[in-house]
Image (spheres, rainbow, N blue to C red):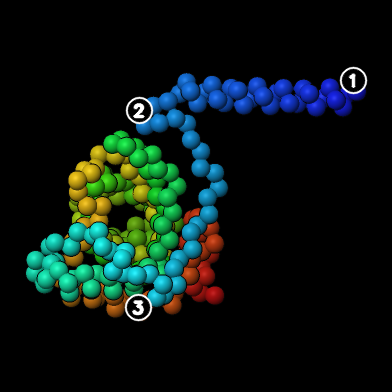
Amino acid sequence: MTEAKKTEEIDIDEESVVVDKDVEDRRRYISERGPFAINANPQLRPTPEPGRVDGQRATKDFDVAALAEKHGEEPVREKIGEMIESIAPGVSENVLFWQGGDNGMSLVHVWFGPNMPLFRHSHPKNGDCLYYVAAGEAIMGRRTLGPGSTFFIPNGMPYKYTAGPDGVEVLEFRAGGGDETEPGMRIDELSLDSVQGIIDKAKENQHLWKRPPGFSDTGHIKPHEA
């Protein structure tokens, strides 16, 4: 047997040992949330072109009861659909990790384009959420939250914010604790006038919504200024 052949066999054997050890560890270290897992090198999802999102279809499962009580179901559904169509080109949502189950952990990355107004809403189905500002800025009330900032939203609490002048990237950490009988998205805007204000601001800023090339590039690479 040649030296090259011996080396090849040794390499294969060592690789087999590593693979076997990895399988053994996967079986040994399993929590109530699941086994060891890796999601390596994800890519940012593209944003939809203006006019490509069907707002009525996208919002059919939204809970709009509070507004519908004031203005009627049909006009509210129509206006909320228009709002989603107006902001969709400024959003890239990327699911980085998802376990499912009652206590399953999840990690979602979201990019919002410059000055994009996020509507007032809540997620009663999904549980508590810790938000981490990874890049850019989020303007929440009178506070400007830059990179490294966090905010914790208890399950079902309404919230909203606006992306900063360069946009914002946030990470959403959840670990279960929601209520499967509740809606995943509840609209908590107080009037159709406020919804129209979001639509107007979105349309004013759509020309700036150019997604950066990679994660955490917001504020460092500024495609909207090119």
Q: Which mark is residue 203?
A: 3
- Please give the name of the residue rendered at 50% of the width and 26% of the height, measured from the top-left corner: 26
Q: Could you say whether the residue bearing mark 2 is in a helix, strand or loop?
A: loop
* C-alpha distance separating marks 1 and 2: 50 Å
Task: Identify residue for label 2.
Answer: 32
Of 104 and 138, nearer the camera is 104
Instruction: Name the front one of labels 1 and 2.
Output: 1
| Element carrying mark 1 | loop
User: Where 154 falls versus 212 (above or below)?
Assistant: above
Residue sitting nearer the eye, 105 or 111: 105
Expressed as whole percent of the image width and height from the top left, the position of residue 135 reads 44, 57
- Going from N to C along the chain, the mark reached first, 2 or 3, is 2
Residue 55, position in %: x, y?
31, 69
Mark 2–mark 3 Cα distance, whole angstroms, equals: 45 Å
Residue at horizontal 14 percent and vertical 61 percent from the top:
65
Q: Residue furthest right?
A: 2
**Residue where numbered disc 1 is placed:** 1
Which numbered disc flags the more N-terminal residue, 1 or 2?
1
Q: Residue at x 12, y 62 (%)?
A: 66
Give percent across and percent down for residue 30.
42, 25
Name the residue at 41% across, 70% down.
89
Which residue type does callout 2 highlight?
Glu
Figure quadrant of residue 139: bottom left
